[in-house]
Image (cartoon, rainbow, N blue to C red):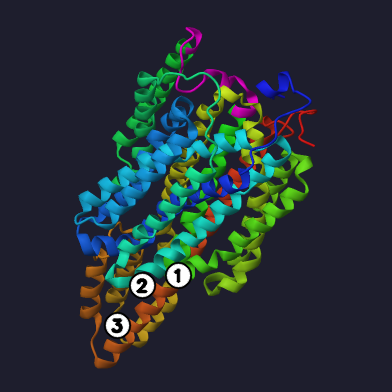
Amino acid sequence: MSTTGVASTETPTDSPAPYRWRWAALFVILAAEVMDLLDAVVTNIAGPNMRADLGGGASTLQWLAAAYTLSMAVGLVTGGRLGDIHGRRRMFLVGAAGFTVGSLLCAVSVSPEMLITARVVQGLFGAVMLPQGLGMIKEMFPPHESQKAFGMFGPVMGLSAVCGPILAGWLVDADYFGTGWRMIFLINLPLGAAAFLGAVRYLPKGRSGPKPRLDIPGMILVSLAALLIIFPLVQGREYDWPVWTFLLMGASVVVFVAFAVYESRLGRSGRDPLVVPSLFRKRGFSGGMALGLVFFSTMQGFMLVFNLYTQIGLGYSPLKAGLVMVPWSGGMVVGFGIAQGIARFGRAVLQAGTLVMALGVFGVWLTLDVMGSGVGPWELLPALLVTGIGMGLLMAPFFDIVLASVEQHETGSASGTMTAIQQLGGAFGVALLGTVFFGLLGGGIAGAVDHRSDHLRQELTTAHVAPAARDRVVADLRACASDRAVAKDPAATPASCARLEKDTRTAVTSPEAGARVPAALKSTATSAFQSGFGSVMKTVLWIVDGMLALTFLLSFLLPRHARPEGQGGH
């Protein structure tokens, strides 16, 4: 296994004592992760309120999240390298301060353009702040403690992802001091100040090794490559995947290749590349990047689709939809605790977590198959708990195993690259599973109307609706239910629904029919809507399990253990 590193070549018998404030420093780093994860998801809940207050079109909702994701992904690799150059503590402080200022700008925005620009500021400074954490953990913690430190990222990510929508829904509904949606950004001010002051007090000041120079051409190339792939992934569904989205993604591959060639030449010439090429000659790191891309795609895509299913398909409020995911989050904490007790098994823990998570996802499928549209939070609890336990087992050893083969001078580059993979994977998973979900949804709901059409025709016959009018109304309902489910602007009335209203008025020939026909249409549409959402959700769950199977296979590229034999910290 590729587990070379500076510390493995020569391990002194009297190693220096671990950094005294390492656990306090870890919580400062995790606080930064929480701020990022919360801000990545809160606009999904508060977006409609923001648009109602500030104006803007349907694409405004998309850009509130996309502006943050794009700027974060574009800046992450450079942010990690800046930590190597100027010191990780200093860059963490710059990032935390800038992120907090960006949050304030979001809170005081008076137009959609100002809010989206402020989201870009948040993302760019977040890209400076976040990569420093992984590098500092690797420096601060001895080998026998590093798995526990890295393993805490999993539960924190899960709790933040679940609590984000709950917090956003609560703050918007509570409308503290008349601030409405602005409070979701104002709450970052005390969090950011605490992270900054905590960093000043507890983060280590040292910066080891010689000071490299910033690779400006490399920074431009990797930023352009990330932009070319993230932009169409985020915006593709909004524009029904036109040809230019695929051309941009193809161009991103070309730019990534040009970046790799340039970085390799820079490394051979003895200069300082932005991404150290030697990282990708290590199977453990390259395998970890591939695994991370697939896994984070799976995780974020599953969360998006499941939230769409509960909120739109089952009609849950944002708060209730967030509470449904609490067992998943609690399971992650349990999985993390189990992983600490069996950490000596290394890669096998991660592999077991993948299998347990796949079992939990299958349990969700089985629950939906048995319960149908009558499924409730309590029925979903066991499967989501198992899914969370598997995810905790998977996440606990992941970072430590991947960084095991990274040398000290590569840490900043590796941290930035790993964090960028998280963002890229999340965007890819949301685009992939979101596109599949909405692509199947129209047909799923139309098919559900077809299954109920005989009963609907009977109801219309009883209401003395003529045969020709019955056929028109049933066809209109099929088209309306399908179009409304996949509409990009929920507030707009699809043409098929307007046609349904017109044909229904024409078909009604008596006061009795005037009451009976709309009730029959509403009952059929509601039932078909829930059933169609459920059937499409079950299809997506099979895809999720397929992605987890690929994650399991990729795990064999990782080292068996987080640290080479003989390099433990006991």
- Judged from the image, the secondary structure of the residue bearing numbered disc 1 is helix
Left or right: 2 in relation to 114: right
Label located before the other in sequence (2 or 3): 2
**Type of amino acid at the residue the image marks with label 1:** Leu
Q: Which residue is mark 3?
A: 465
Coordinates of residue 332 in the picture (x, y in percent): 63, 56
Q: Quadrant of the N terminus?
A: top right
Q: Is residue 173 above or below residue 341?
A: below
- Judged from the image, the secondary structure of the residue bearing numbered disc 3 is loop
- Range drawn in magenta: 267-285
Coordinates of residue 403 in the picture (x, y in percent): 62, 32
Coordinates of residue 429 in the picture (x, y in percent): 48, 45
Q: Few, some or many C-alpha atoms within 10 Å of disc 2 (few <14, some 14-19, many ≥20)?
A: few
Q: Which residue is mark 2?
A: 173
**Type of amino acid at the residue the image marks with label 2:** Asp
Q: Residue furthest top?
A: 269
Label 2 vs label 3, nearer the camera: 2
The magenta stretch spans residue 128: no
Q: Verify CB contact (< 8 Å) between mark 1 and mark 2.
A: yes
- Judged from the image, the secondary structure of the residue bearing numbered disc 2 is helix
Label 1 vs label 2, nearer the camera: 2
Tell me the distance, in whole angstroms, between the alpha carbons under discs 1 and 3: 42 Å
Tell me the distance, in whole angstroms, between the alpha carbons under discs 1 and 2: 10 Å
